[in-house]
Image (tube, rainbow, N blue to C red):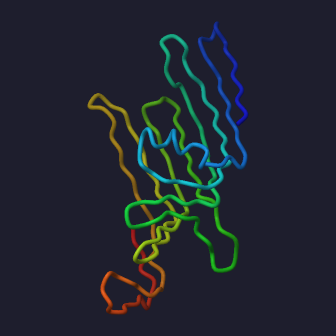
Amino acid sequence: IHLTCAVESRANTLDLTATAERLELARFTDLIALFANLPISGQVDLKVQGRCRLQPFGVASLVGEARISKTRLALAGASVVNSTPAEGEALPVVIRMKTEDAREWPWSVGPFTLQGIAALQVSGVEGRLTLDAAGWRADATAHALVPVQPLEPCTRTPLSLARPLALE
């Protein structure tokens, strides 16, 4: 991880830049476990630029992007993995977040595949975290496709999906 900081006391700001290449997520499982039980592995390339106000301390702006390859995130009954197009290599899961005022935080995540009883190809999830007088509010929209595939539910009855099913 490469981290640079610049303090401008007259301007009352702290500028911060962080970058990382091929950082193994498995090295942070103990830290992640402090917040959530999310077994995760993969490699991340990270770029973050931010500006903070020093007095009183607060985030003035932030732009960040993480690209995760070899992704494996275990959820109850499913796993999140990288999407792989029919004619290519696995695509990185790209996470983007940006704020200009620390009150509106637009973000996006995708593409990825959710593997469980059936595969769900998620081209993207876009959302916004907003801080107002009532507290934090979140909204999100997902774009997904259930591709043609055999379905293997908990029963012995074989099922299959004959046509892709788009979900908005």
Quadrant of the rendered image containing residue 151? bottom left
Residue nearer the viewer, 106 or 34: 34
- In the rendered image, the vertical position of residue 26 relative to residue 142, given as above or below: above
Q: Residue at x 35, y 45 (%)?
A: 138
The N terminus lies in quadrant: top right
Q: How many marks?
A: 0
List x then y, in percent, for residue 35: 42, 40
**On screen, residue 141 above or below 2:** below
Q: Left or right of 121: which side holds 21?
A: right
At x 64% / y 65%, what residue is drawn?
A: 91
Foreground residue among 128 and 69: 69
x and y percentages locating residue 162 in the rendered image: 43, 91
Looking at the picture, how far across and down is residue 136, in whole percent? 33, 36
Residue 58 drawn at (x, y percent): 49, 21
The quadrant in which the C terminus is found is bottom left
Q: Residue furthest top?
A: 10
Residue that appears at 55% across and 63% down: 111
Front residue (pair 164, 43)? 43
